[in-house]
Amino acid sequence: MNEEVQKVKFICPMITVENIERSRDFYERVLEQKVESDYGRNVGFGGFAIHLRTHFQMLINNKEILGGGNNFELYFEYDNLERIVERLKAEQVEFVHELREQPWQQQVVRFYDPDKNIIEIGESMEYLILRLFRKGNSVDEISKLTGLEKEYIEKYK
């Protein structure tokens, strides 16, 4: 392949997990993610992967792997946040915080996966715009509240 034309291609983030079966179950059952590849110690979902921590540690010359640093999150979108919060409570997940509104009006919930990685689920920006329209806001008001371009907002009017 021509080195001058080839570019580095980003594939996905990967997080390490203590128990691959437990984490796979969490992402499949609780967050409804579909497995795209399963190599035993590494499982790929649509857009991210999980890797067995002990195996990955061996691959990086047994360097220490720290978890739960609150410095990284996986972000998902789901428009019925009340429903997902109920599901998370039934699963007894540990919340970073329950449903709240961000400064740009988007509703989100943050919680930990079984390995203390932060997971955020937020309503899509399209849903946010529709929700703000339903509350009687104008295009100008929604733009001011969210920071979104008026042209983008008008597509959902």
Image: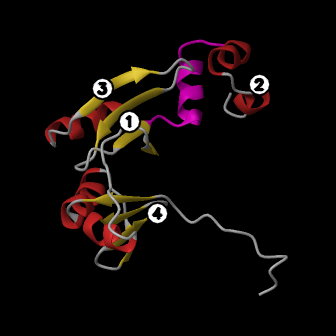
In the rendered structure, which amino acid carries the disc numbered 4? Answer: Gly
The alpha-carbon separation of the residues under discs 1 and 4 comes to 20 Å
Q: Which residues are magenta?
A: 122-138
The alpha-carbon separation of the residues under discs 4 and 2 comes to 31 Å
Query: Which of labels 3 and 2 is toward the front?
Result: 3
Relative to 155, is 43 above or below?
A: below
The alpha-carbon separation of the residues under discs 1 and 3 comes to 14 Å
| Quarter of the image that includes the C terminus | top right
At label 1, counting other C-alpha atoms closer than 10 Å, the crowd grade (few under 14, some 14-19, many 20 or more) is: few
Secondary-structure class at tag 2: helix
Q: Quadrant of residue 137?
A: top right
Tally of marks: 4
User: Mark 1 or mark 3, which has the lower sequence index?
Assistant: 1
Secondary-structure class at tag 1: loop
Residue 126 sits inside the magenta stretch: yes
Residue 12 sits inside the magenta stretch: no
Residue 80 disc label: 1
User: Mark 4 or mark 3, which has the lower sequence index?
Assistant: 4
Residue marked by disc 2: 150
Residue marked by disc 3: 98
Q: Can residue 36 be seen in the rendering of this structure?
A: no
* Relative side of 15 to 54, left or right: right
Residue marked by disc 4: 46
